[in-house]
Amino acid sequence: MPTRWPRDGAAMAGKPPVFEYVMTGDEESFLWRLDDYPWERNVWNIHPEYEVHLVRNAAGIALIGDYIGSFGPGHLSIVGSNLPHDWVSATAPGEIIAGRDIVLQFDPDRLRRAAALFPELSGVEPFLARALRGLAFHGETRRRGAELLEAIGEAHGLDRLALFLRLIGGLAASGEYEVLSSEGFVPRLDPGALGLAERVLIYVHDNFTRDIRLADLAAMTGMSESTVSRFFKRNSGNSFTDHVAKLRIGRACKLLADTTMPVTDICFEVGYANLSNFNRLFRRYRGTTPSGYRRLTRQRLR
């Protein structure tokens, strides 16, 4: 059965990258996820967050800025703000490479603000500047970086944050890297589409606790509801309904962990008018009830 390269040639053809909206929960300072390949967001994309990317178990072609090169299992790289990127593997029709990628995305300004308070992080700025062109790591840095990325997925709370800082510190201090994209590379962007996506996503983030509807976005953008629904899914990676639910459940988690507010009050505070619906959705996204989540967070603090 022949293999195929599942891409439309967007990077090589110079087409604008797709804007990816990176959403972290209220209880997270960075996003960690484990991705199968392919999935709908495996595209030539761009976002303001930095991305540490580990390919665990496959080979293929890396496209980072104007860099094109091969990768194999264990490939570890970092991509800076607004540098287009994609990692492409050949697959047979219907084939899924389970758990191909570990992706860690973080806001560089949050790290800069932390460095202003903690002098031990003062070396991060030169590293962030280097990473704007994309870096691929090798040797002991690659091996240790992969171990830390795996461990972060199993950790919680301060342990998780400590592992993240160890990862960034190790990458920043390493000389075992290759610079990828050329210094003069400037991506071709569609400012109109990127700006509209940003305005829509900010609007949803600022209003998710009220009775927000797809019709509100249609009125805001001048699109039909079906068109704005597709636009939202393409630029956020979630349906409008799932996106709002994730924002609400994330806010509920923070209130459950940090306050003694009754669950019923939290339900209304985050935008739900029905307690049973809130409980059902909370269990779907967190695997437990709101009360169960509160008990777990308090046990971890003991």
Image (cartoon, rainbow, N blue to C red):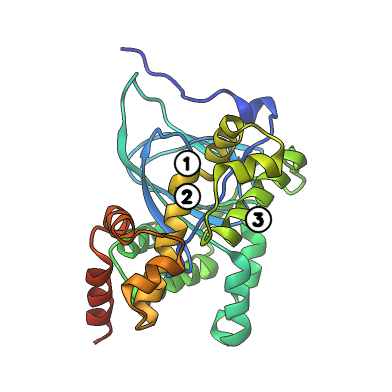
- What residue sits right under mark 1 in the picture? 239
Q: Residue at x 28, y 54 (%)?
A: 280
Badge 1 amino acid: Ser
Tell me where residue 31 appears, x and y as whole percent. Answer: 45, 59
Circle number at residue 35? none
Circle number at residue 243? 2
Tell me where residue 219 appears, x and y as whole percent. Answer: 68, 41
Rate crowding at label 3 as few (under 14), some (14 to 19) or many (20 or more) other CA atoms within 10 Å.
many
Where 226 sits versus 194, above or below? Answer: above
Q: Quadrant of the C terminus?
A: bottom left
N-terminal of the pair, mark 2 or mark 3, is 3
- Tag 2, which secondary structure? helix
Residue 138 visible to the viewer: no
Q: Quadrant of the N terminus?
A: top left
Rate crowding at label 1 as few (under 14), some (14 to 19) or many (20 or more) other CA atoms within 10 Å.
some
- What residue sits right under mark 3 in the picture? 132
Q: Residue furthest top?
A: 1
Rate crowding at label 2 as few (under 14), some (14 to 19) or many (20 or more) other CA atoms within 10 Å.
some
Tell me where residue 294 appears, x and y as whole percent. Answer: 27, 75
**Would you say 269 lies left or right of 302 here?**
right
Badge 3 amino acid: Leu
Q: Are marks 2 and 1 in contact (CB under 8 Å)?
A: yes
Task: Locate residue 160: give its quadrant.
Answer: bottom left
Give the CA distance from mark 2 to mark 3: 29 Å
Q: Residue at x 58, y 59 (%)?
A: 207
Residue 25 visible to the viewer: yes
Give the CA distance from mark 3 to mark 1: 30 Å
- Tag 1, which secondary structure? loop
Frontmost residue, 295 versus 22: 295
